[in-house]
Image (spheres, rainbow, N blue to C red):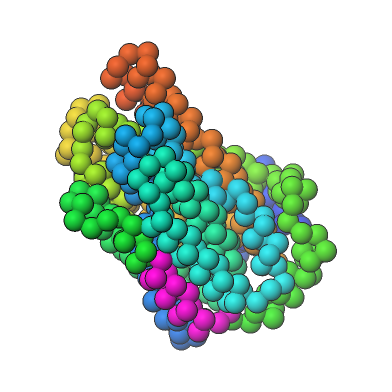
Amino acid sequence: MGGEQILMRPIGAHGAGTCQRACLRRARPIKLRRVPAGRIVQPSALAEGIFRREILPWGCLGLTLGLVEGATAAVLVKQHFAGAASLFGVNIAVALVSGAPAFSNVLSFVWANLAHGRARVQLMVALQAAFALLVGCVALASRASAGLLLTVVSIIAARVVWAGILTVRAAIWTANYPRNVLARITGRIVIVNALAVGTSAALVGWVLEGRAVEARWLYGAGALVGLLGAWLYRAMRVRREFQLLAAEAASGARTEPFSLAMFTQILKQDPAYREYMGWMGIFGAGSLMLTAQLVLLFTEQLHLTSAMQIALLAVVPLITQPLFLPWWARLFDGSHVLRFRSRQGWALVLASLTLCLGVFARSLGLLWSGAVLLGAAQAGANLGWNLGHNDFASLGRAQHYMGVHVTLTGLRGGIAPPLGVLAYMGLERWHAGSGQYALLLALALTTAGAWGFTRMRRALEG
């Protein structure tokens, strides 16, 4: 294409079937407009002003979120409740909390219905406050079987509410920021959020390692910081919110709430999005399965400390994301999500392979390298997950497309981690030390998903 880029046109729900089928069959890109190579469109002053109102609240909420992030919560459960319940019960709890960030999205249709036709900021503040209070409930858990149950329920409930926050936030970001700068502006927020989550995760590792401070005090403090973030978010505004609400009303969303029927209708009428969701399911299942398996392997076979486990699975990936996210953001802003995912997918395959080799070889060097590569891949994954549906949906349907995406994420979040843990425990019961080969199942799924994205990209571009 010489010195030019071709930006892919977002495809609306109603015209998706015919347009996307034709595009995939003819294997021709959809040309919207040409942008000279190397040209960077700068955000407007209005977009920058809106961004400045968002940055501090999301930083505060990131500190709270870090306490219930999948890998961090999994290490907390494995270490804090060791001996308080059966090994099988603790391992299943590890699977549940590590998959909670994904599993919680299965109820996203509730949030999509709740948000439609309502002022976004007031709803967002209420959800943020509820999330902070649920994280604080972990501080009430005793170090016993009942405490383990309360911890798991509180973490899952907090992540359910966070799923609502993400669903509403996607619509706010789409309304506030133009598509050609969307990833770069929201990428800055993701960077701050990632650093805050990483800081919080490091504190959990320090508490579990030194035991100088009770973990419950850390979770109580995190709840207070989250409430502060919710209070600060009240100053946020949604640009031309009346147009957003009008577009939602025109789409029939008021009279037809998001439901199983709408879920299946979107997938039936939009074959390209259906295929994209299929490969996302396979790809995401492998990624989710890997985390729970690594926590068990790090504890039971490699005997790594709590602090090192959290550093490898949470802190290093999170603090390295800001280094790679600007590159991913430029790639996303200048191309269709299929081109983006076809590259990001193989980055995650490389990270997963390196971590698996680190376990097999008992090599800390490979594990640290894998952690850095995981951060690089996750930087792109965050953008693709939050924004990718916009390349298939029109403005009035964006939230419903996101609802389909996160609902399917929830399904694999409830299935993949427990399946990975059961595969590990089954192999260990068959032959002690063979549980590490369960990692190959996760790696195979991730590789298959990356291949699927590449296949779709080639069909789109020709």
Q: Position of residue 434 (x, y in %)?
A: 31, 19
Q: Quadrant of the C terminus?
A: top right
Viewer-closest of 338 and 186: 186
Would you place residue 440 above or below residue 430 in this image? below
Q: Position of residue 13 (x, y in %)?
A: 72, 57
Asked whether residue 457 is in view, the answer is no
The residue sitting at the top extreme is 430
Answer with the quarter of the image where residue 347 lies.
top left
Residue at the extreme right: 255
Which residue: 41% across, 56% down? 140
The answer to whether 67 is drawn above or below residue 228 in the figure is above
Left or right of 260 on screen, residue 101: left
Q: Main secondary structure of the magenta part?
A: helix
Q: In the displayed structure, would residue 193 be above or below residue 53?
A: above
Q: Give the quarter of the image for residue 112.
A: bottom right
Residue at image position (51%, 68%) is 128
Percent x, y for residue 307? 22, 48
Residue toward you, 261 or 133: 133
Horizontal relation, residue 7 to residue 185: left or right: right
> Which residue sits at x=31%, y=61%?
218
Looking at this view, is 258 or 6 the one in front? 258
Residue in the picture at 42% in, 76% down:
228
Whether residue 428 is in magenta: the answer is no
Magenta-colored span: 223-238
Position of 102 with respect to 428 (left or right) is right
Quadrant of residue 243 within the rendered picture: bottom right
Q: Is residue 402 visible?
A: yes
Count all numbered tags in the image, as a single digit.
0
